[in-house]
Image (cartoon, helix red, strand yellow):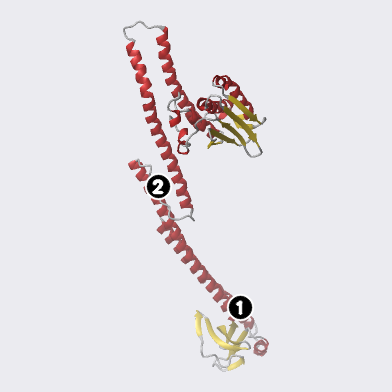
Amino acid sequence: MALLFTVLLAVSAAILGYFLIDFSRREFLRETEAAIDIEISMLSSLTESQAGLVPYIEARSRNGQAARFRYEDDQGIWLAGSLDPLPANVAKITEGILRFDAETSQGKQAFAAKIHTFSDGSRIVVARNIHELIASYDRLKYLSFLIMALMAAVVAVSFAISYFVVSRINRIGATAQRIVETGDLSQRLPIDSRWDDISSLSEVLNGFLDKIEELINGIREVSNNIAHDLRTPLSGLRSDIEALKGRAVDDQQIDALLADADRLLAVFQALLRIANIEKGKRGQFMRRVDVAIVMGDVVDLYEPLAEEKNIRFEVNMRSAAGVRGDRDLLFQLFANIIDNAIKFSPPDGVIHVRLTADKSRITAVIEDQGPGVPDHEKESVFKHFYRGDASRSTLGNGLGLSLVRAVADHHQAEIVLEDASPGLRVRLSFPPYQ
């Protein structure tokens, strides 16, 4: 395809160059012949009176350099005009038009001439100075050659660009085909330059493949974690149910079984909530929400639980900190963070809850005095079912911070885990309501 495009462009350039040169040549000849024919027509009108023709020729020969004449009888004897004798270097331009060089006040210049025979057998040679016409023709011819050269350069550059683009597109297609055939999402498009749009597209596609690979690996990891984390409670539930076969069942045993089933359902409900948030299915609930009010409600809800461990809250929040969000999801986000803070804080500890706002960001900070999170686990704790070393002995399903990350991303908020020395500081930064 690139070769066909190049051939068509080259043929077009050749046709254009030929047309320009041929057109300029035809115009040059037409203008020259028309000027000479006008002179001949004027002279023909004077042939009835030879006494009138000769003085006209002599006057025209004296008064200008643009025209030259030679008037002779039927025997070739010179009668009037400045062409005596005729120049020796006469050449044929086209049928009926001659060319020769003659001396002028500006040096030797070119003339075009036609020979006209009158009815009495006498002849006249009418010559026209074509020096300026030839100069214009030469300039146009050089310009035509320059255009053809530029078109040739355009052809070469176009072929190079076409070959470059087609080869890169074929390479993208080949990589995609290999991924489809092998299912290996680790393959990436090679990038050997940074200046062209194809390389920019390859970078975007590589990022796209990175995201797909990350999502696929996340799905596999979640599937493995679900199988691992739910196998034990499901096996226990099955064993408990099987043990009841053939026995009288009391309400206490039924309640225990229902509690086990509720815990399993809670895991799946949390997964569904996270999936719905990540897919943006709650976008219709987004409206202006005051973060200070939501955080205050969460603190009020968890104060009784904190008092059981002699944990107190230190709250410092600025009111009217509005964001565009889903109030229920924001409530769940802060509830999960504060629940973890209470869970990991030591007795008699303090949980700091702060909220600041300016024109560019609204920042919420929740800080506890627990064991904190090691640096190598700060990104992993947001994965589904991940439980760090400090949380192995606590109740939970490893989905709390996954839900926090999903809600934060849904609200375009940045979440950062920091060391509080001791404890963990969770910093959430929201864009203000627009």
- Residue 433 visible in the shown view: no
Is 423 drawn above or below residue 182 in the view shown? above
Residue at horizontal 49 percent and vertical 26 percent from the top: 273
Q: For the residue carrying disc 1, how many other residues have a C-alpha within 10 Å: few (<14), some (14-19), or many (20+)?
A: some
Per the image, label 2 sits on a secondary structure element best described as loop
Is 16 drawn above or below residue 212 in the view shown? below
What type is the residue that disc 2 sits on?
Answer: Arg
x, y percentage for residue 143? 54, 71
Q: For the residue carrying disc 2, how many other residues have a C-alpha within 10 Å: few (<14), some (14-19), or many (20+)?
A: some
Q: Of 185 and 422, which appears nearest the observer? A: 422
Would you name the residue on which mark 1 appears? 35
Q: CA distance from mark 1 to mark 2?
A: 73 Å
Residue at far top of view: 248
Q: Of 186 and 394, which appears nearest the observer? A: 394
Apparent side of residue 388 relative to residue 66 in the rendered image (left or right): left
Q: Of 162 and 42, which appears nearest the observer? A: 162
